[in-house]
Amino acid sequence: MGTVVVGFVPKPEGEAALKSGIAEAKLRGSKVVVVNSHRGGSEFDGEQATKAEQEMERIRKVLDESGVEHELRQLVRGFEPAEDLISIAEAADAELIVIGLRRRSPVGKLILGSNAQRILLDAKCPVLAVKAD
Amino acid sequence: MGTVVVGFVPKPEGEAALKSGIAEAKLRGSKVVVVNSHRGGSEFDGEQATKAEQEMERIRKVLDESGVEHELRQLVRGFEPAEDLISIAEAADAELIVIGLRRRSPVGKLILGSNAQRILLDAKCPVLAVKAD
């Protein structure tokens, strides 16, 4: 059974990645591994931890209802999210990584975030980039 | 029937995009539209045109043998390849765009090409980025 790895962030583009990752796993008869990673550190206080826990509960519910075999991982360990995602994808021999990208406004600058660029450049498997509806 | 649009370039990453685009179209029961675009201009002389024509023949053969419904377009009209690809994908109401990315060397700089960035940022549909084997 193959594995689709989803890079989740609690933003519209993260929701799009989750939805698309589930659909791709269904299409391929694969399981989905959702990775929610935080860098931790001083920004990550008690209130944020509670919020993150609620977020995890919600994602778990979405995954349970999808009917797709799944795994949910929350990582708080000080690495860049791109590194977490790539190392998990490699360990799982993933066939696909799904990430969400922000839309840019008509006058927005033409530059992808460094995490997205790193995943796109360094992942060994194909990367599906989706945007919020 | 859905449409998968492939951005082809005569390079290993372009071959990977072609192969992956055919596989994705099969998986989705969709047709594949392969776009081979050149900017034209002074760089594009008679010799290059002949080479491009041979390249088109070869791609056509790969597509014919794939058994997937397909369309092959060669564009030489002075636009950036990203614009060609995005406008074709929008006109076809594509469900997916497939592009090839170069691998970077271990010491390579962390930057995606401007065409790839533009497609990733501006495409309305999901974009699958693949690398050469």
Image: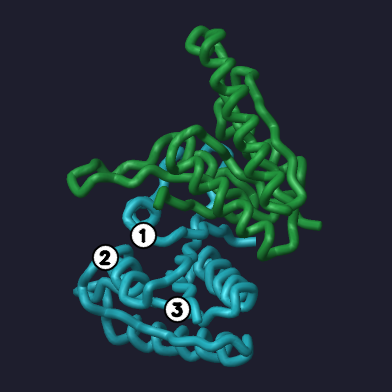
Chain colours: A cyan, B green
Gap between marks 1 and 3 measured at Cα: 18 Å
**Eye-nearest disc, 1 or 3:** 1
Q: Secondary structure at mark 2?
A: loop
Gap between marks 2 and 1 measured at Cα: 17 Å
Find out whether the residues at labels 1 and 3 contact each other: C-beta distance under 8 Å. Answer: no
Question: What residue is pinned by disc 3?
Answer: A34
Chain label for disc 1 = A
Classify 10 Å Cα crowding around label 3: few (below 14), some (14-19), many (20 and above). Answer: many
Q: Residue at x 57, y 46 (%)?
A: B18
Residue B29 coordinates in the image, percent (x, y): 74, 62
> In the figure, is residue A79 to the left or right of A102?
left
Classify 10 Å Cα crowding around label 2: few (below 14), some (14-19), many (20 and above). Answer: some
Find out whether the residues at labels 2 and 1 contact each other: C-beta distance under 8 Å. Answer: no
Question: What residue is pinned by disc 2?
Answer: A80
Tag 2 and tag 1 share a subunit: yes
Gap between marks 3 and 2 measured at Cα: 16 Å
Residue B92 lies in quadrant:
top right
Amino acid type of disc 1? Lys
Residue A81 bears which disc, if any?
A: none
Residue B60 seen anywhere in this rendered image of the structure: yes
Residue A5 coordinates in the image, percent (x, y): 45, 73
Please state, as top left, top right, bottom left or bottom right, where the C terminus of chain A lies in the image.
Answer: bottom right
Chain label for disc 3 = A
Amino acid type of disc 2? Glu
Amino acid type of disc 3? Val
Does label 1 or label 3 sit earlier along the sequence? 3
Find out whether the residues at labels 3 and 2 contact each other: C-beta distance under 8 Å. Answer: no
**Eye-nearest disc, 3 or 2:** 3
